[in-house]
Image (cartoon, rainbow, N blue to C red):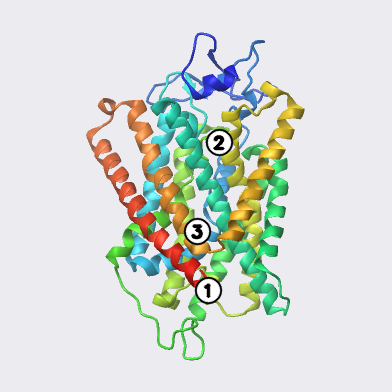
Amino acid sequence: MEAFKQLVGRSTPNAATASAAAEQDSNSSTGSQSFDESSSKTGGGKITTETTRDGSGGDVYAEHAVKRTGTWVGAVFNIMCISIGTGTMNLPSVVKRCGWFGVILFVAMAVIGWYVGVLFRRAMYSRRGRRLSSFAIVTREAFGPWGFWFATAITYLYCCGTVISWIIVSGTQITRLLGFAGVDLDDRISMTIIAIVMWIPFTLLKTLGEITVSSVFGVVTAMFTVIVLGVVSIQHKYTATYHAPGYDSAPTHRFIIGEGIPSALASISFMYAGAVAFPHIEGNMRKATQFGWMLFLSNTLVCGAYLVSAVSGYYAFGNQTLSPILNNMPNMAVVNAATILIIIHVIFAAPVMLVSANLELELALGVMAGIIGRKREFLWRFVMRTVTMGILLAISIAIPYFGQVIDLVSAISTTVVFFMVPVLCYVKLVGWRNIRVYELVLCFIIVAIGAVACVWGLIDAIKALKKAIHDGHG
């Protein structure tokens, strides 16, 4: 347990921090690399990944160290695969909540998400000669063992909550599609099928570097779906003969709804809160100095997809917008095809999200070949990930309310992951005296916005979930 104690706590005389390095252009068997980080606050020089050596001098965490085998293109696809998914079907409802002002919020959150990612990467390299290799380890370095466990818990909650929303929307939409064909299938059975399909790659693939191909496919299907839903929304907006159930008048639109802004911020942060996966994605990039502009490009593309979905949906249905937006759509072949593709997308995206969360947990618990051997490592990983998927399925069946689950997860976890933890870690590790005044002001504003969105969004999400449970539908 010595390696585990060192990971959670501070360094002790009996455990040394060591390099898991190899030259960037090397083809060594470890695959771990060091590289020149000239843009870091710490200056240039060789950067090594924080790992722990066992008694024999081997790197017990080498398999979790940076691999540096991927390209910036693969990193873009990984981020887009995590971001663009079923959440896009909730975005028109988010604009409904705060009015057209939500469009401004989408763009602002894309910029903030990029800036927070840049700050967090600086925090990763804030210790001269070392790369803090995960979201939890950065937080531990800043706030000690309590910070480590908080970050591990919030990461797990965010990733698992996201996948729960995916299981819910995929299962319910499968039931909806089969209903059009005259097949009566219970939502619970549909969700179970989806969870089993997600479970297979989740248990067999260990790192993000192994699932880039699935990320590419996931992004392609998601973008096609966004375009289809945008076009169909505009073509089939409210008419006297076609409208949402319970509405017999044309939809209305508002520019700004002030009371809905905090909870809308929480929901939008859900779409950009990829900070928990940034260390793993950056660690897989062959040229890590490309991370900043790679993230900017990713957020630009993601924001564009979000705007297509949000603007077209709210324009077409206004205050009658439902969540997911598919429930506003007619029974058309192209819509059903898009629905099938979004289901395929989340099946491919789920391993990206869950692997990020479980890598943190497995690292914390010492589940890796260098400590317990390859066979036991595979067995423990298989058991832990199978139990994780079983729990997610059980929650999905117990609380099958898509929009409300997204809002709750957003308020509890993504406001913290997106607005607060990366910024606070940056300020703590770099030191506020070493940060420009305008950056400190920006950091304070971002954290303050996150705090308001967290508290207010949580209140609204709990109210909405209680109402959904009481009414028996989302």
Q: Which residue is mark 2?
A: 280
Tag 1 near tag 2, CB within 8 Å: no
Image quadrant in which you'd find residue 212: top right
How many other residues sit within 10 Å of disc 1, few (<14), some (14-19) or many (≥20)? some
Residue lying at the far right of the rendered structure: 375
Tell me if residue 290 can be seen.
no
Tell me if residue 17 can be seen.
yes
x 40%, y 85%: residue: 250
Q: Nearer the viewer, residue 277 or 392?
A: 392
Image quadrant in which you'd find residue 44: top left
Q: Which residue is mark 1?
A: 231
How many other residues sit within 10 Å of disc 3, few (<14), some (14-19) or many (≥20)? many
- Residue 314: where, in percent of width, then height? 42, 72
303 vs 172: above or below: above
Of tags 1 and 2, the one toward the viewer is: 2
Of tags 2 and 3, the one toward the viewer is: 3
x 29%, y 68%: residue: 256
Q: Secondary structure at mark 2?
A: helix
Q: Secondary structure at mark 3?
A: helix
Q: Secondary structure at mark 1?
A: helix
Structural distance between the alpha carbons of marks 3 and 1: 27 Å
Q: Which amino acid, by three-letter code, is at mark 1? A: Val
Left or right of 236: which side holds 351? right
Task: Determine which of the numbered discs, if any, sits on residue 405 in the image.
Answer: 3
Q: Which amino acid, by three-letter code, is at mark 3? A: Val
Q: Give the mark nearer the N terminus: 3 vs 1.
A: 1
